[in-house]
Image (cartoon, coloured by chain):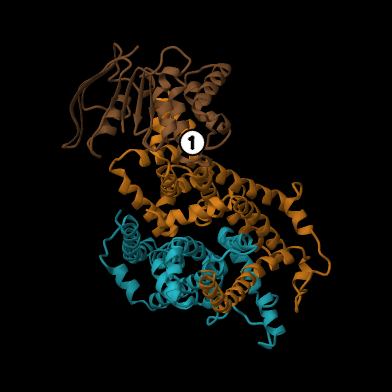
Chain colours: A cyan, B orange, C brown
Amino acid sequence: MKDKVFIGLDNYARILTSRSFREVTMNTFIWTVASTFFAFLLGLGAALSLHREFLGRGVLRAVLLIPYVVSAVAASYVWKWLYHSDFGVIGALAVQFGLTDRPINFIDNIHTVLPSLIVVNIWKEFSFAMIMLMAGLQTVPDQLLRAAQVDGANAWQRFWHVTVPHLKGVSMVTVLLLMVANFNAFIIPWIMTSGGPAGASDIWITQIYTIAFGRQRYGLASAYSVILFIVMMTLGYFYVRALTRGDDTRVK
Amino acid sequence: MSMVSAAPSRRRRVKIDPWRWVGRFFLLFLLTFTVLPMLWMVLTSIKSQFAAMQYPPQWWPAEPTLQNYAKLLDPNGSTGQEFLRYFWNSFYVSMVTTILGVIVAVPAAYAFSRFTFPGRTFLFFSVLLRNMFPSVVFLMPLFLLMRWMGLVNTHGSLILTYLTFGLPLSIWLLKGFFDNIPIQLEQAARIDGATRFQAFFFIVMPLSTPGIIATSIFSFIGAWNEYVYAYTFLSKQDSMTLPVGIQRFFTEFATDWPGLMAATFLMSVPVVVLFLVLQKYFVRALTEGAVKH
Amino acid sequence: MAQVVLKDIVKTYGSLYAVNNVSLTVEDGEFVALVGPSGCGKTTTLNLVAGLLPMTDGDVMIGDRNVTDLDPKDRDIAMVFQNYALYPNKTVYKNLAFPLQMRKLSKAEIDVKVMDAAKVLDIVHLLQRKPRELSGGQQQRVALGRALVRDPQVFLMDEPLSNLDAKLRVQMRTEPKTLPSGSQGDGDLRHP
């Protein structure tokens, strides 16, 4: 018991002033925002394109959802193979189409590793946004769209003035859920790079894991977790607000 | 009258076409983006180790072979034994989690739906909590707890953990389904001579089957794919589940990529099949779990 | 043969009185309609008689039995609900058969009774359909049929005849007398 010393805010001070903290935070920020933004954008596009009835629509929706269903572990291995520095198919295709002379080394390069992982993450989760927004689109009343058409609104105006306001609630929830999921993502960065090379793909969660289970610095890891907790609480506050606001509109 | 209605419809056809084409190209792009990695996984899995490690790659396997699959599924070989062991472990853990989850969640959700008591808000916030916090944060305390209970390296530790984190969502989902079943149906049944339990069992249960299916696949897929807890709680070879086992398997030597691809393929088959067959329910669970309050 | 007696029944929700001290005697074979503006407690009163809600105070007697503490299933009553409450996953036949099954009648007995009720209500051709495939009027007849098959002591009907077409309404009002089996509905509480 003697070696248990209360060190006050030392752990926090050490975390917040360290250089790696700034880097990891920056990575986390890029990872979270970019993944969320593109996943939402692709999901929105897919939902809008799939909203109209056409042959094979159900099949297409199912196929697009498969990445969301398979385990992140499987996805990580498959993409690791696609990105392989010597035999990866993406590098080979790039050479084939004359984009580069030599296969690109995607995940062993500190400049390309983070974007490469973000692509995997988007691949895995954009269809979640798609499904949510498809459900949201179904709540847009047909009558309103027709009324707008009668009033002379073109396709874009109808989308902007009728569809978008109706999607606001569900978009809010989707973006927040994606943010939270990305912020908490562990498997893809862990399996594909474990935060490397040189910490270029280290995000908070992988960092906490390494500190706790690799270096066994539990105090430091706990302090990290608390900071994470505070960020999550902030996001959670907006999440609850988005959900309850959706509630109000439903009641009315 | 007919002229009036004909004019806008012709105009609409002309105006919407470009958007429709944008949509089609976009879907084509997404389809390629989604399918190519999966396709390459399958193509690699039917190559030999030698054929996979070539540059430029064989776009189509020159000598397609099923030997990777045969090796993984061979109950006599050492690789096959291990793989099948992991597969069985995954199946066992997911199945038990799902069944126990349904057994607990159905009555709990029914109670939340039909009776008013202060726990309602608590349930809502436990679902939120589960949505909000990463498993890594809970990892350490849970690991210590499991060690204290002597559950490290047992499947019980995983089942217990998955249930703890899965139940709030399951209950929440099922509650949504029960809420949609009018209470008058049960009242009618009780007047028709059924006890409360019979009314639940004969009338409410059959009507909530879609909800039960949705909840079940959700928890099955969740348990099947879970990695972080399994990675930490299980260190003994023969107790590992697939996501963890697969990793140990192939990194000890130089990575056998075709074998790994075959293994990821086999690992994905159960959840993808389950999803494709019960898609409707899965999608419903997905949207209800997040949107509805 | 049954008489229904409500003795000082009270139902409160917190400080709100939904039903305040109602006493009423419905003689054997009598029709009684409760009339009043919406929200005045008609449905609540019916639910109290049926035993679907716990009573705050008072007693309900059916015949010479005090049923105040009995479960709905033991009160020997039938009820038609405002929105019909047909079991959506069961066919019309099974909807009609359910109360008889719960009372453990034999298959043959059930069949006879269901067919009798179906004939009277003119829904024989609908027996294999599901409720959602029926029109509003047809659903109503099935709901009435489910109450009629059972020869209960009391019929409770929550706005049962309001949407019925005129012809059927006349037919229905005379119905309890024409049902073949012996002891039919004696007290009838309903409100238009």
**Where A39 sits versus B245, above or below?**
below
Q: Nearer the viewer, residue C33 or A140?
A: C33
Mark 1 lies on a secondary structure that is: helix
Quarter of the image containing the C terminus of chain C?
A: top left
Q: Residue B199, image x and y in percent?
A: 44, 30
The subunit letter for the residue under badge 1 reads C
Looking at the image, is C16 positioned above or below residue A139?
A: above
* Residue B181 spot, x, y in % from top left: 43, 41
The x and y percentages for residue C8 are 18, 22
- Residue B57, by quadrant, is bottom right
Horizontal side, residue A155 vs residue A243: left or right: right
- Residue at image coords 32%, 65%: A238
* Amino acid type of the residue tagged 1 in the rendering: Gln
Quadrant hosting residue A107:
bottom right
> Which quadrant, please, contains the N terminus of chain C?
top left
Residue A78 seen by the camera: yes
- Image height check: is A140 above or below B269? below
For the residue pair B249 and A48, the one nearer the viewer reads as: A48
- Residue A207 in view in this figure: no
Q: Which residue is mark 1?
A: C138
A210 in relation to A155, above or below: above
Instruction: Locate residue C135 relative to residue B64 in the image: left or right.
Output: left
